[in-house]
Amino acid sequence: MLKSKRSFSHIITLFRKDLLLEIRQQYSFYGILLYVASTIFVLYLAMGEPEGAVWKGLFWMIQLFICVNAVAKSFLQEGEGRMLYFYSIAGARDFILAKLLFNTLLMVLMSFVSLGLFVLMLGNPLARAVPFVLITCLGGVSLSLVFTFLAAIAARARQNAALMAILGFPLIIPQLMLLMRLSNVAFSDALQGGVWGMALLLIALDLLIVVLAVILFPFLWKD
């Protein structure tokens, strides 16, 4: 029990550290917001208000780029000296869980901002808004978990761009396909079968990523 409380305290402390750094380095957050707004505005100038299928494809493509910019760089700011300090005060498991938690909340926030800008600039082709908001939240969580896990591996292997590209493609494609199929629910008035099965499969993949991160990252941490 005491060990669990200590671990939870470490996770909260590391999470607060990332949050305070993000608040102090506001140029990073506002830079991502500017990137999102300018990209969506360019899409608006080029396409106006696209039909539902195009709108859906563009939305998840932008989510992917947002995740790469907002989440995948989280380990680049952690130098060798800082990592050694974290190693001395907290375990690898606490560190990676804190990173997963912070990046998940950041990506969910950016997903909602992106959704609002999409509806504002590119129109609202959604037949069911509430399910799509829930799918957007689930998609933000899924993308952030995958890219945080990949960023952790790439940062410790010191092959950031190449390794993330190699590992990211086979991991992210199944999630994007599930998210695209789940999104069809929000663009049609007719009920579709298999929705809950796809949602549970996506949640299972998310849990698998968390388990892999908790198991594998301590071995990378020791290097």
Image (tube, rainbow, N blue to C red):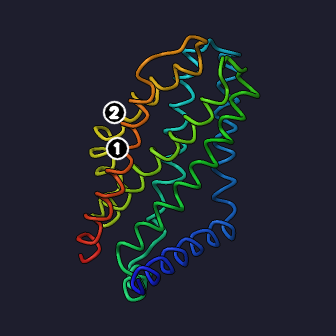
Mark toward the start of the polypeptide (2 vs 1) = 2
Front residue of this view, candidates 170 and 187: 187
Q: Quadrant of the N terminus?
A: bottom left
Residue type beneath disc 2: Pro
Picture coordinates of residue 75, whole percent (x, y): 44, 65
Tell me: 205 left or right of 103: left
Q: Which residue is mark 2?
A: 174
- Quadrant of the image containing the C terminus: bottom left
Q: Of the residues shown, which amino acid type is indicated by label 1?
A: Leu
- Crowd tier of the residue under label 2, counting other residues whose Cα lies within 10 Å: few below 14, some 14–19, many 20 or above: few
Relative depth, front residue between 177 and 61: 177
Q: Farthest residue to the front: give it.
A: 1
Please tell me the numbered disc located at residue 205.
1
Q: Considering the numbered disc 1 on the image, is that residue within a helix, a strand or a loop?
A: helix
Of marks 2 and 1, the one in the foreground: 1
Q: Label 2, label 1: how many angstroms apart (C-alpha)?
A: 9 Å
Query: To which quarter of the image does residue 27 belong?
Result: bottom right
Above or below for 167 versus 199: below
Residue in the picture at 63% in, 46% down:
110
Residue found 48% across the figure and 62% down from its top? 74
Q: Crowding at label 1, few (<14), some or many (≥20) Cα neighbours within 10 Å?
A: some
